[in-house]
Amino acid sequence: MRHRKSRLQLNRFTSWRKATLVSLTKNLLIHERIKTTKTKAKAARPVIEKLISLGKKNTLSAKRQAFRVLQDHKLVSLLFSDIAPRFGNRIGGYIRILNLGARRGDNAKMVILELIEIRKKKPKKIKPEAEKKQEHEPEITKEEPLEEKKPKTDVAVKEKPPIVKKPGKKFLGGLRSIFKKERDSL
């Protein structure tokens, strides 16, 4: 009997459900924002929260426990080096679920599942030396004339004749040749 054992079963067998949750977790760690159904997002939330909490510990044991779920060394290193340090000040609540509305085909409630602390793309910085040069006088550089490359005319280029495809035999024509009656055989 399964009294008081509550979890979202996702209408799948145990192995399928675990695979679905691991797949959602991997994709969230890679992309930091995914679109999924509301029930899948609610089922994946505890798995992701536990992994980020393990990432904050940053011990060998925690890395092995995370690898047991993720089964990918690159993702484990991404989790421990990049994602978990962002949540150093937080105690919990590392992801958010934003409602989108119903899916057109089956009317399933769709959500965006994302990390609270999303990596921001840094604008490209100009090197300090380059800024100093731009602020002062622009330096004059001597440009050397570029040599034009001329095609070699000494060697005669042989042109290949165009390749003409032979028309293939039709299907029935090929079969006729296989099953052709030989008059001499009788």
Image (cartoon, rainbow, N blue to C red):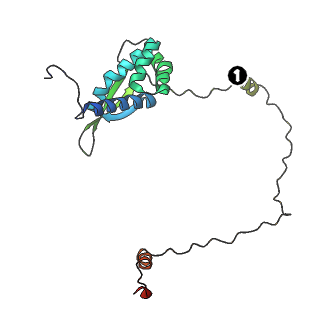
Residue at position x 13%, y 20% from top? 3
Residue at position x 41%, y 29% from top? 26
Q: Looking at the image, is 56 positioned above or below residue 139?
A: above
Residue at position x 39%, y 20% from top? 51
The quarter of the image holding the C terminus is bottom left
The quarter of the image holding the N terminus is top left
The percent position of residue 70, horizontal first and vertical second, equals 41, 26
Q: Dot 1, crowdedness within 10 Å: few (<14), some or many (≥20)?
A: few
Q: Which of 154 and 133 is in front in this view?
A: 154
Residue at position x 81%, y 31% from top? 139
Hey, what amino acid is under mark 1? Pro
Is residue 114 left or right of 164 when viewed as pictured? left
Residue of label 1: 128
Q: Quadrant of residue 96?
A: top left
Q: Tally the numbered discs.
A: 1
Q: Looking at the image, is 156 positioned above or below residue 65?
A: below
Q: Nearer the viewer, residue 28 or 138?
A: 28
The percent position of residue 90, horizontal first and vertical second, equals 40, 13
Is residue 77 left or right of 36 when viewed as pictured? right
Q: What element carries label 1?
A: helix
The percent position of residue 18, horizontal first and vertical second, equals 31, 29
Residue pushed farthest front? 186
Q: In which quarter of the image is residue 172?
A: bottom left
- Please indicate, yes or no, whether residue 78 appears anywhere in the rendered image: yes
- Please indicate, yes or no, whether residue 58 appears anywhere in the rendered image: no
Is residue 52 left or right of 109 when viewed as pictured? right
Is residue 149 left or right of 5 when viewed as pictured? right
